[in-house]
Image: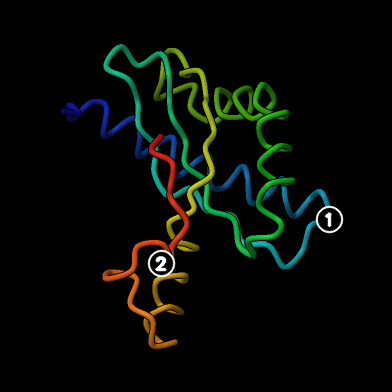
Amino acid sequence: METQRQKKIAGVLQQDLADILQRAATDSGIHGVVLSVTKVYVTSDLSIARVYVSIFPVPEATPLMNGIKAAGPQIRHELARRTRHQLRRVPELHFFLDDSLEYIEQIDKSLKGGENPIENRDLLVRRKKS
C-alpha cells in the first residue's frame, strides 16, 4: 500500500526523470527513439525508487537500458539538482525495462492472425515478474 507521500514523490521523480532521459537521448545523437518513464515506485522509507522505462522501437531497448543503468549516478545527480527544493534526499534509482507495450502488441498480432492467445497460452512469451 503506497502512502500519499510515496505517490507524490514518485510523481515528481517520474516527471523529472522522463525529461532527463529524453534530453540525454537527444544530446547523445540518438534519434527516432521514444523513451518514457511509465511508472515509479518508491519504498516506504523513501530510500529506493524503482523506475520503469519504456523504449520504442524495441530492438533499441536493451543497449539503451544498459546505457541508462551505467549512467545511473549521473542521472541521480541531475535529479538531485532539479529536486533540491522538493526533496531532502534523492532515492537510489533502480531501472527496469517496461515491456508492456511489446506484450500488448504481441497479443494484438495473435488476435488479428486468427490465433487465440487466451486459448493457447504457448503463443505468448512468458513475462518475468519484477
Q: Which element carries disc 1, helix, strand or loop? A: loop
Q: Position of residue 45 (x, y in %)?
A: 30, 11
Q: Which tag is nearer the camera, tag 1 or tag 2? A: 2
* Placement of the C terminus among the 4 image quadrants: top left
Spot occupied by residue 33 in the image (x, y as percentages of width and height): 68, 62
When the figure is inspected, residue 119 is found, relative to residue 40, above or below; the finding is: below
Image quarter of the N terminus: top left
Q: Nearer the viewer, residue 59 or 77?
A: 59
Does dot 2 land on a helix, a strand or a loop?
Answer: helix
The residue depicted at 34 percent of the width and 30 percent of the height is 9
Give left or right: position of 57 versus 84.
right
Q: Residue at x 27, y 17 (%)?
A: 44
Q: Residue at x 45, y 13 (%)?
A: 89
Residue type marked 2: Ile
Q: Which residue is mark 1?
A: 29
Residue 53 percent location from the top left of the image: 52, 46
**Rendering quarter of residue 128:** top left
Residue 60 vs 84, above or below: the answer is below
Q: Earlier in the sequence, mark 1 or mark 2?
A: 1
User: Label for residue 104?
Assistant: 2
Q: Quadrant of residue 77?
A: top right
Mark 1 is on which residue type? Gly
Residue name at image x 54 percent, y 44 percent: 97
